[in-house]
Image (tube, grey):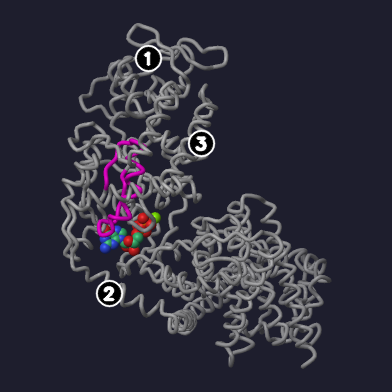
Amino acid sequence: MRLSELKIGEKAIVVKVLGRGAFRKRIIEMGFVRGQEVIAELNAPLRDPIKFKIMDYEVSLRRSEANLIEVVTEEETSSVVYPTSHGTTTEESTYAHAAEVRAKTINIALVGNPNCGKTSLFNVASGANEHVGNYSGVTVDAKAGHFDYKGYRINIFDLPGTYSLSTYTPEELYVRRYLNTEMPDVIVNVVVASNLERNLYLTTELIDMDYSMVVALNMYDELQKSGAKLDYKLLGDMVGVPMVPTVSRTGKGIDELFDTVIDVYERRNKSVRHVHVNHGPVIEAAVNDIKERLRTSHVALKYSPRYLALKMLEGDKEVMEMVSDSENFEELKALSNKLRAEIEQTLHEDIEQAVANEKYGFISGALQETFQQGKDDERNLTRVIDSLVTNKVVGIPIFVILMCLMFEATFVLGAYPMEWIETGVAMLSSWLHDVMSPGPLKDLLIDGIIGGVGGVIVFLPNILILYLFISFMEDSGYMARAAFIMDKAMHKIGLHGKSFIPLVMGFGCNVPAIMATRSIESRSSRLITILINPFISCSARLPVYILFIGTFFPKHVGWAFIILYLSGIAVAFITAKLLRRFYFKEDETPFVMELPPYRIPTFKATCRHMWNKAEQYLRKMGGIILVASVIVWALSYYPRTDIEGEMTPQQLAEQQTNSYMGQIGQAISPVLEPLGFNWKISVALISGTAAKELIVSTLGVLYAGGDDTPETLSAKLQQPDPSTGVADFTPLIAATFLIFVSLYVPCIASITAVAKEAGSWKWGLFSVLYNTLIAWLCAFIVFRIGLLFM
Ligand code: GDP
Ligand code: MG
């Protein structure tokens, strides 16, 4: 825990002092060194500062300063059993030993550009299975992992990718706040070795912030393959940060990386020093001016004054906020505003630009001496492929063909394993039918569980194939190109290319797709992308499509799918356009999307990706779908009239209509009757709000039953209803139903994602109402027009 959390009268042992430079030095000089005992003595009236006793004299620290000292208390020691190597058991020694163990814990944060291999590094180091993708925006939250290495416990955090640490995007803000509040012991700055010019920009910003740091020169294999040469020792010495070549895809260099991290942590590394990136005489003079006046401010103890000064000159809101409680804040603010105006006038460019230019100058100077360009095969290959797939004439056709191929493969290839699973499920069900004696348990098993879960599990192969394609596009780098070529089309609806990736991801599942919108800088573009995402047909709707199209339009499978997917896309685009016109005033952010070099995804990574999806899907089967199937079954099974022996179809229909489910369905069917839906369909639609797969499993349960009914659900749907003599579904009702399902209310998980990412439940509610209304209107139009022709 931190010293600031120590209660009055409590004792603790100092583990380590976080923070940097002058502050750290002062604290250490006061006696706060590893192994010292400290007692909290007194709280000031406003709980700040706190008086401590250390080495027999008293010191007072502000709460914020005490927060930078990590300690371990006796209580913590006794609650955790630490392994003692020497077997001593006296209280004193376990106590000290605990502090020792805690001091051997290193918190590491991975910081780097999007797509530089942070998550791959995180995975090889910690043995975790996070998703790796070849475009920006895959890691949306910090992921934590840990492992033991050479007697150290290493906690590792995978942060979202950023190009810089301004506060332009949510990711940048997130990373900066994370570094400022969590204060990791060592930052591992992951850079792409073959693209140092750009990647080192972030490094220069981290250098300004003056954290303990190691640079991982990742993708070193690519640098070597291109024939380039880099004197990374010299480069590290020049910028004051040790550099280690790594290949995080294979794990090469990872041990050396963590050896270096430990050296830096223990302050044994010779390369480490704090280098000032020179910003030219005009800016430097201003920085010094502000820095002088910051000295007295206590934030300057915690953060590098040079960094604070630079950011104040840039007018950075976050830093302004951080220094706002220093006494001379008003003076500082006025001064930095004045200096900024002067600088901009002298340099004829705005200060951020000037700072960036100087940083790039610093980088290119450092690389001049240490880097030798190779012949660059890889980049040539990328250029050749790009000239094709981003070509004005053939780029879009290639994309369309790939999409068609994706859906074609999903259905055609998926049909075989689907048939096997279907046969298996039918066999299991008829076997149970033969061996079990009649009763509610048998009905529950066959109609409730196998009818519900079995009806959905057959679509697992299709979903896997779809995910295989999407993950291949993500991992190879093609997805970034797709965004690039769609930029113009996206501009037409007031969005830009970056919004395109979440939309394509939506074909898999809307939830991660909605989270992937975090890489979009403009808030209004982000909100629009979030809100239109549920109109993109996710894979959970696939079972409904496959079932109904296969049953009612077997001759026009291709067209039916295209129409369904396109109508979803059309509604999404129209919605975007409406939102842009009436709700969000125009705000265009320039298109800033990188085109990463193509990378053939490793077989292992692709398999891992697929397995993650399969696992999620199976878990959903065992969880929500199983439970919901049983509930739907019970609600349609009870209340029960006692009938001896098997029911006639007539009795069965009557029983179902009178069941609880029948009552619910009838209650809402006035709303859905204009669309030609009966109560069973209404019930299926309601249960689909929990998860779209449930539509099929609910129909499976409701249309189960009866001995002389056919084996497959598809055949059951076409059977005439015994009480009315006509089938519940005609091709027209099926078409109306499909349109409705493709558009209506997002599933609960998506609604939650919308609300969370948009920052308010208002938008979640909007999604529910708007989508259902649109679905109803579209379905109504289809149904009425259809009736005219029947
Ligand atoms: P992140 O965005 O920084 O988390 O990057 P990822 O870990 O998702 O990786 C982005 C892409 O780079 C993936 O396609 C990885 O397979 C690939 N990659 C990661 N590390 C290496 C490496 O050391 N060498 C090569 N050749 N590719 C790598
Ligand atoms: Mg990542």
Residues packed near mark 1 inside 10 Å, few (<14), some (14 to 19) or many (20 plus): many
**Where in the figure is residue 526, as x and y percent of width and height?**
57, 58
Q: Nearer the viewer, residue 511 or 286?
A: 286
Q: Quadrant of residue 330?
A: top right
Local SS, label 1 = strand
Q: Are marks 2 and 3 in contact (CB under 8 Å)?
A: no
Label placed on residue 381 = 2
**Where in the figure is residue 640, as x and y percent of width and height?**
77, 66
Q: Which residue in the protein does label 3 denote?
A: 337
Q: Which residue in the protein does label 1 denote?
A: 38
Local SS, label 2 = helix
Please tell me which residue is depicted at 49% across the width and 72% down the height of the picture: 463
Residues packed near mark 3 inside 10 Å, few (<14), some (14 to 19) or many (20 plus): some
Cα distance between the residues tagged 2 and 3: 48 Å
Q: Is residue 694 left or right of residue 241?
A: right
Kind of residue at badge 3: Asn
Q: Is residue 194 magenta?
A: yes
Cα distance between the residues tagged 3 and 1: 43 Å
Q: Are marks 3 and 1 in contact (CB under 8 Å)?
A: no
Residue span colored magenta: 188-215
